[in-house]
Amino acid sequence: MSCSLGAQGASWKSAWRALLGCKDSAGGVEGPSLGAASANPGGGKRRGGLLESCLGGPPALDAGGRKGGSEGRALGSSMETSADLLAVAAALGRADEVRALLEAGASANAPNRYGRSAIQVMMMGSARVAELLLLHGADPNCADPATLTRPVHDAAREGFLDTLVALHRAGARLDVRDAWGRLPVDLAEERGHRDVARYLRAAAEDTEGGSHASADSAEGPADSSDLKKD
């Protein structure tokens, strides 16, 4: 089911305005107002990074303010539009908008125009956003093709335990290394996130213990005939 702009009441204009007004909280990105950014060309660099990764800029407008420029160019397919909007909402940690888009039919795994899914660009400080995406089938093990970084690496590096736990419970692997050979626990320890590192070490021990238990059970009990001989 595709998710058109009309179906969930969103528009490029509202998404653009949302990005311009974002706050720096729980792993988000902050930038000055549009006016301040215009007055200070360097002031909007951090916000610009988010715009580049999630939207890539606003749609072209013609002299009358209509989308698509003078040629009346379409915005693209409805699913492409919903993927971009979902990535923006997830990056800003706006759980209500994420829920609305998902319930309207947006795919949790659809890549935005830069090839990133919502769970890869989401605000790591919003465990609720992570839970919503995972509930709707987002892949917790999706990796960046260049850096091999997965959502668990990001959550561990930034120190967001609740998000890490949500990812782990949804099947995220914790024993995966990024392109520099670092495990999530390595990143947590580097940044001094002791609670996160503790959780990751305990999870690793549980996994090893479970593997040993499975191996023991696979061997099975002693043969009953052997017991009788004794």
Image (cartoon, grey):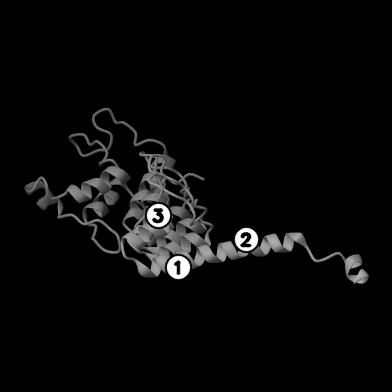
Q: Mark number for residue 53?
A: none
- Viewer-proximal residue, 216 or 101? 216
| Label 2 vs 1, first from the N-terminus | 1
| Residue drawn 42% across the image and 44% down it | 148
Q: Marks 2 and 3, how far apart in space? A: 23 Å
Q: Residue furthest top?
A: 71
- Above or below, comparing residue 35 to residue 126 in the picture: above
Residue under label 2, please give it. 211
User: Is disc 2 placed on a helix, strand or loop?
Assistant: helix
Q: Nearest the camera: 178 or 50?
A: 178
Amino acid type at circle 1 is Tyr
| Label 1 SS | helix
Q: Which residue is mark 1?
A: 199
Give the image location of residue 193, x and y in percent.
Answer: 34, 66
Q: Residue under label 3, please give it.
A: 153
Q: In the image, what residue type sits under mark 2?
A: Ser
Q: Is residue 197 above or below residue 82?
A: below
Q: CA distance from mark 3 to mark 1?
A: 14 Å
Name the spot of residue 63 as percent of width and height, x first. 17, 34
Q: Quadrant of the C terminus?
A: bottom right
Name which residue lies at 8% across and 48% down. 40
Mark nearest the camera among 2 and 3 is 2
Residue type, numbered disc 3:
His
Residues at marks 2 and 1, CA–CA distance in whole angstroms: 18 Å
Q: Secondary structure at mark 3?
A: helix
Visible residue check, residue 155: no
In the image, residue 132 lies at what x, y percent? Answer: 46, 60
54 in relation to 196, above or below? above
